[in-house]
Amino acid sequence: MTVRRRKAAQRTTLADVAAMAGVSAITVSRFFNEPHRVGPEPTERIRAAVEALNYVPNLAAGGLASAHNRVVAMVVPNISGPIFADTLQALSDGLAVGGYQLLLASSYFSVEAEERAVRAFLGWNPAALVLTSRFHSAATERLIADATQPVIETWDLQPGRKPLQIGFSHRQVGRDAAQYLLDKGHRRIQFVRNSAAGDLSAQEREAGYAEVMEAHGLEPRHFVPTAAAPLEAGAEAMKALAARQRQRPEALIFANDNLACGALLAGQRAGMQLPQDMAVFGFGDYAFADKLLPSLSTIRPPARQIGELAAAQVLQLGRGEQPSALTELVCELVARESA
Amino acid sequence: MTVRRRKAAQRTTLADVAAMAGVSAITVSRFFNEPHRVGPEPTERIRAAVEALNYVPNLAAGGLASAHNRVVAMVVPNISGPIFADTLQALSDGLAVGGYQLLLASSYFSVEAEERAVRAFLGWNPAALVLTSRFHSAATERLIADATQPVIETWDLQPGRKPLQIGFSHRQVGRDAAQYLLDKGHRRIQFVRNSAAGDLSAQEREAGYAEVMEAHGLEPRHFVPTAAAPLEAGAEAMKALAARQRQRPEALIFANDNLACGALLAGQRAGMQLPQDMAVFGFGDYAFADKLLPSLSTIRPPARQIGELAAAQVLQLGRGEQPSALTELVCELVARESA
DNA sequence: TTGTAAGCGTTATCAT
DNA sequence: ATGATAACGCTTACAA
């Protein structure tokens, strides 16, 4: 009888270890997954064989057999931005504790890119799928609804849907920023948008700002930078708005701290007196925010906390527990020198 | 005959699609992997079935069967730092083109953490394993040597070893920085270390600096900050060294731009005249470097390029081509106002 | 162009 | 405590 083999047996497998240790494959499997169910002598022989063969278990095979993969997939708008990086780092670290790996993709604020990533990720049958924001394509919604894997939406809240929610209200952030500046006596307050068009959470913050402005009988206005790089975009907004003859704003709320920092640095370089010439308010509390001159007033989102809680929920799910459906976190307004 | 099933059939499989389309499973498999080998009518029926069932192929199963997983695993010191984030972003984007996903872990400059990550990653049988730097534990070296997967080392160079290399010489970076400051007429030049102790590449840069200093008959000196956060650490170094009565340095080379930016901002806030009171030189060319006052002189590593080239090499390997073993890239010295 | 059978490396199930 | 066997969902090898 000819045994058909697909390829030269190269990778060392459970069977190789078992043969060397003089036990069956399943015993080696138990050695890894339920060590207490293996007696002391076989344990020692298996340990030696694993060591000698430098055996690495094939996790894809294990996951296929057990329908339980120790991977978590996350889609973020971008990897290199400071905000999501903190969430990612915290998530990755939290997952590492439970032996989970992180599969990552970036959407660049595009729901189509997100959809492609979600589709590919579901193919890996991850222990959980973590998304950023609650804005998805219709097809993504369908994938999520049909998915057998738990889905965690972060950085936003939308109660009553299937995914677990860990986030906060962006609209409230916008309201808080506007109210803070109004309380400081400003009236001509303008919102500077992110040049990344698909940032729908930033639009929510703008909506919150607009809501408060209108409640005070003031007209909400926004500026849209053309520069793609956030520091440049912030500088562009600062220069354009400070130079305005009519309707010159007294205070600016930026879609995020990168923009606000760009504005601050551009203002400083142009010799502006800040915040007298222009009050500047951000969102994110990036690392530089409290170091700049003037230091940046901003709202700090619970970026790390989101990652930590998401990791904790994945571990809970792994233990068969059911995490709470809605985790509402709060942002902190940090009043500094710039506004 | 009783068919034993392990779990309630939940996930829709290739077989479900095949049944609905009235073809065999292998034909559906070909529909995805070799569409040209499937006739037009079956193709249409399969397309409809996939759509109706919202079918998502199980990539773990496919990878197990074909021994070819479309995942690339990368270990970086940290995800949230600006440098590696650029490499990661570029790698992730480049891989997405070829339909590859990115598995990620961070080592925090610890070779033990790196080893754990490498071990777990090899279990996923990735198309390639991408590492940062050439410093590994002995066990990691052994895992790499035995691995059937291609390994790509980035951000450094060490010819003659098994892994493909995409990087540059950190020692040369240190030499260039020192030579630049010497050419500017400085003599008391000091190196400020990263507070992350395991950053061996930074130590290489320091060695290059020391080499040039000694060649000029000058004594290399270093400062070790205690603060963990890089901006704070840089500020700490600036304050401590500027206040020194004896041996006060004229110029500082920082292990990276975060430290240098922290120093610049602290100096500015303290009312120092920069670069007259202290010349500052960095490494990394982070986004803020050219925006600060004074703008930061630094050396720009090819961070994005490394990610792009790594992705390109993975795609090459996927096509059965053999990428060049050594890709030496160059850093660019960016002379600005701070030194 | 399409199908059958076997195999990828592991774990669940049942038996001893 | 240990093992035999089937199953996980897919693709390779070969056949028609």
Image (spheres, coloured by chain):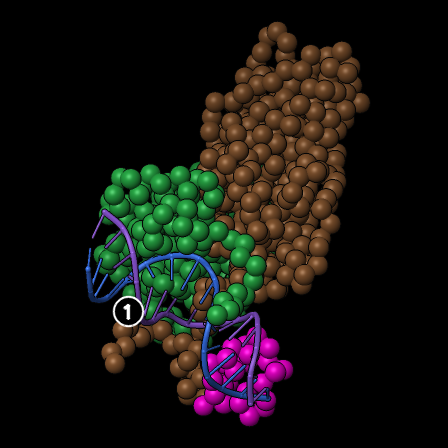
Chain colours: A brown, B green, C purple, D blue
Q: How many marks?
A: 1
Q: How far across and how far down the image is residue A287, in percent?
A: 62, 43
- State whether residue A47 appears in this view: yes
Q: How far across and how far down the image is residue A187, in percent?
A: 73, 15
The one nearer the camera, A203 or A33, is A33
Q: Which residues are magenta?
A: A22-48
Q: Does residue A35 show up magenta in the picture? A: yes
- State whether residue B111 appears in this view: no
The one nearer the camera, A74 or B77, is A74
The amino acid type found where label 1 is placed reads: Arg
Left or right relative to B22: residue A266: right
How many residues crowd mark 1 within 10 Å: few (<14), some (14–19), many (20+)? few
Q: Single out the residue that lies furthest toward the bottom.
A: A41
Q: How far across and how far down the image is residue A217, in percent?
A: 76, 11
The one nearer the camera, B283 or A255, is A255
Establish if B6 lies above or below B166: below
Left or right relative to B259: residue B203: left
The residue drawn where x is 69% and y is 14% is A188
The one nearer the camera, B35 or B164, is B35
Q: Quadrant of residue B327?
A: bottom left
Q: Does residue A248 show up magenta in the picture? A: no
The residue drawn where x is 63% and y is 82% is A36
Q: Single out the residue that lies furthest toward the front.
A: B1
Q: Single out the residue that lies furthest toward the right.
A: A183
The residue drawn where x is 33% and y is 61% is B66
Q: Quadrant of residue A215?
A: top right
Chain identifier of the residue bearing label 1 in the image? A
Query: Circle 1 is placed at which residue position?
Result: A6
